[in-house]
Image: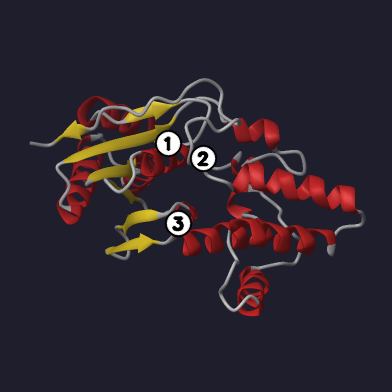
Amino acid sequence: MIALIDADIIMYRAAFKHEGDETFFECSETIDAMMDYIIHRTECFEYIGFLTGKGNFRYALAKTKEYKGNRKDRERPTFLDEAREYLIEQWECISVDGMEADDALGICQIEMDDDTIICSIDKDLLQIKGNHFNWNSDIISIQSDEDADKVFWKQILMGDSTDNIVGIPRVGKVKAERIIDTALLESDGVGTGFTELYDVCLNAYKNNFESEQVAVDKFNETIGLIQIASDKNDDRLEGEFIIPKPVSII
């Protein structure tokens, strides 16, 4: 398989870990160790690492609250830029503009079929079916279509406070799971897929906002913000996304 690596997380983790160090050397060693471990643990001989570049279509889609506006005042670690450059120059990671690294990972996982494994600790990527490796828990798993759909629709109900995405007010993890699980239970597991859960979640929005039009607008906005791209022809993307050639470690 080809390891699809969320290099954003490696970049931030290494930079924050070594905040206060006098030189970048130990930060670079941490990056090397994390990349080496991912490749070793997944037994992959090729990889593609992605970093988020300039611009992001989600900023234009966000109307209720500024996308990631709650992160504006966070301090950047000293070695963040050097960590980015190191990942690009030494590990040949790709910086993608107009989207997030997550979107590039999602597109590659789906477009390249069963030959890939997403390597990340970001729970949002579990809305993408296929192979996954979480290096925090040290677990390799296979996300089915059904489980991927459940992760996605629960997130649509909850929103994502870390990214300043509202969702339905006062709907947290427990209530979101109850709505989805009730829908699955009532269907006896038959015929409840992406389309059916779409209707269930849209109705939940309609039941929690002052008018149907407001509910539909909020619902569509949340989908646009939460959904990780899995198709290089996704109409939210500007321009064509070309899947890069994997880096060989042999």
- Left or right relative to 226: residue 88: left
Q: Tell me where residue 229 appears, x and y as whole percent.
A: 51, 40
Q: CA distance from mark 1 to mark 2?
A: 7 Å
Residue 79 visible to the viewer: no
Q: Amino acid at mark 2?
A: Ala
Residue pointed to by mark 3? 126
Task: Kindly indicate the quadrant of the structure image that contains residue 12.
Answer: top left
* Residue of label 2: 229
Residue shown at 31% from the left, 43% from the top: 5
Which comes sooner in the sequence, label 1 or label 2? Answer: 1
Which residue: 52% across, 30% down? 233
Residue occupying image coordinates x 25% and y 41%: 27
Of helix, strand and loop, which one carries label 3?
helix
Sequence-first tag of 2 and 3: 3
Give the residue at x 49% y 55%.
Answer: 127
Rendered image quadrant of residue 137: bottom left
Circles 1, 2 touching at the beta carbon (< 8 Å): yes
Label 2 CA crowd tier, 10 Å (few <14, some 14–19, many 20+) = many
Q: Secondary structure at mark 2?
A: loop
Q: Mark 1 falls on what kind of element?
A: helix
The type of residue carrying mark 3 is Leu
* Vertical placement of residue 105 versus 215, above or below: above
Q: Which residue is mark 1?
A: 104
Residue 158: image x %, image y %?
66, 61
Q: How is the image coloured?
A: secondary structure
Q: Quadrant of residue 234?
A: top right
- Dot 3, how many residues are within 10 Å of its Cα: few (below 14), some (14-19), or many (20+)? many
Relative image position of residue 48 (x, y in whole percent): 28, 36
Does 141 sit above or below residue 3? below
